[in-house]
Amino acid sequence: MSRFLFALWQGGGTVLPQVALAKRLARRGHDVRVLGPASLASIVPAECEAVAGVVAEWQPQRGLLLSEQIGEFTRYLCGPEWRDAVAAELELRPADAFVCDRHLPGATVASSALGTPTALIVTCLFKGWYDEWGGYVLDGESTRDVQARVDLTLALTPGELDFTTGELPPDVLYVGPVSDPDPVEPFPFPWPAGNDDPLVVVSFSTVYQRQEVALGHVVEALADLPVRTLVLAGEGLDVPVPTHVCLRRWVPHAAVMPSASLCVTHGGCGTTMSALAAGVPLLVLPHLIEQALNGHRVSQLGAGRLVSADADARELREAVLELLGDPSFRAAAQRASAWFDDGSTRAVDALEALARS
């Protein structure tokens, strides 16, 4: 049995695959702890130990784009709090391997200093993060510096989906998507039986990014189209919708994407990957650079369209009609879906090998 420590923040679509990894390791008999803010305690699997509340919650400012508060956001993710919390936990109870979200570079400083083998989890397109993004993330360090500090990087995306430019650094392993080992509860669609209008899933981040503005335009664009619209609005967003539009805070994508004809999204990694895995074309309205890169790749593949987050209802309506009316978008998304074989076993095997090293 090996001892694993995970570090997670409330990062939207980045959380669930890492929780699934923790659960799978625990079910193989390993001792697994998950460190993070108090809000994560409720989703840490029963098989794992939650070390919750030792770091603060991210508190975004309502009414502002995430890019407009990027200074506070960066200080939260990259400041000393995560580094100190991880160092304290590892000194109190050493681990055989530390597993860290790529958003938390300070945490890898702590594990590296203590000599704990460290795995970085990258849920976005790796080369987009490593080459295209390449931003400074901590005290003048680039993403390349963070990558060089860890012992293993697990990219939870298919290698075929990533950009083709740039060299792949050593110790990077594309494992593909990681799934929860437990079955997903079916979603009871609220529309009458026999209604076979196309299902449009509208899914924006559960991390606040002032997405209520774009969501309002999307709902207006879809309001009078012959489609079934399911809006996943996330936490605490007041998005008025017509009575025939189904509004939910969140639904597991695996329960709805196989039935969808189109996904309208901000382009976050979780939603983009789940739509493509189901062969569903996308309309992407990015709010951040990572989301824009995902949308650009979708457009490159012919599996969807990339439009501005400020697009109005008329432009969005035209894009939706194009994506639903042209079968080439669906065909391209279905070709991409062939890349999405489950990488759960590959990921767990790699982490077990790291803990034994």
Image (cartoon, rainbow, N blue to C red):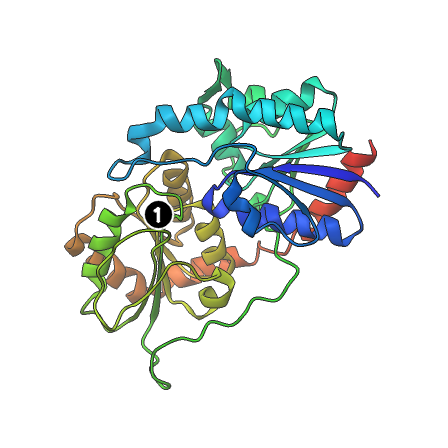
Q: Position of residue 217 (x, y in %)?
A: 20, 53
Camera-side residue of 108 and 256:
108
Q: Residue at x 55, y 51 (%)?
A: 42
Residue at 46% across, 36% down:
57
Quadrant in which residue 293 is drawn:
top left
Q: Name the outermost residue toward the top.
A: 140
Q: Is residue 165 visible?
A: no
Q: What residue occupies the far bottom of the structure in this picture?
A: 194
**Residue 289 at x, y percent in the picture:** 37, 34
* Nearest the eye: 256 or 31: 31
Residue 22 position in % (x across, y down): 67, 47
Quarter of the figure with residue 72: top left
* Quadrant, the N terminus: top right
The residue that disc 1 covers is 266
Quadrant containing the C terminus is top right
Whether 233 is drawn above or below 13: the answer is below
Answer whether residue 224 is visible to the viewer in this image.
yes
User: Where 47 sits versus 209, above or below?
Assistant: below
Q: In terms of depth relative to the viewer, which is nearer, 216 or 200?
A: 216
Residue at 77 percent across and 38 percent down: it is 3
Residue 14 position, x and y percent, is 51, 44
Q: Secondary structure at mark 1?
A: loop
Q: Amino acid at mark 1?
A: His
The vertical placement of 14 against 170, above or below, is below
Residue at the image point whose x is 53% and y is 32% from the top: 55
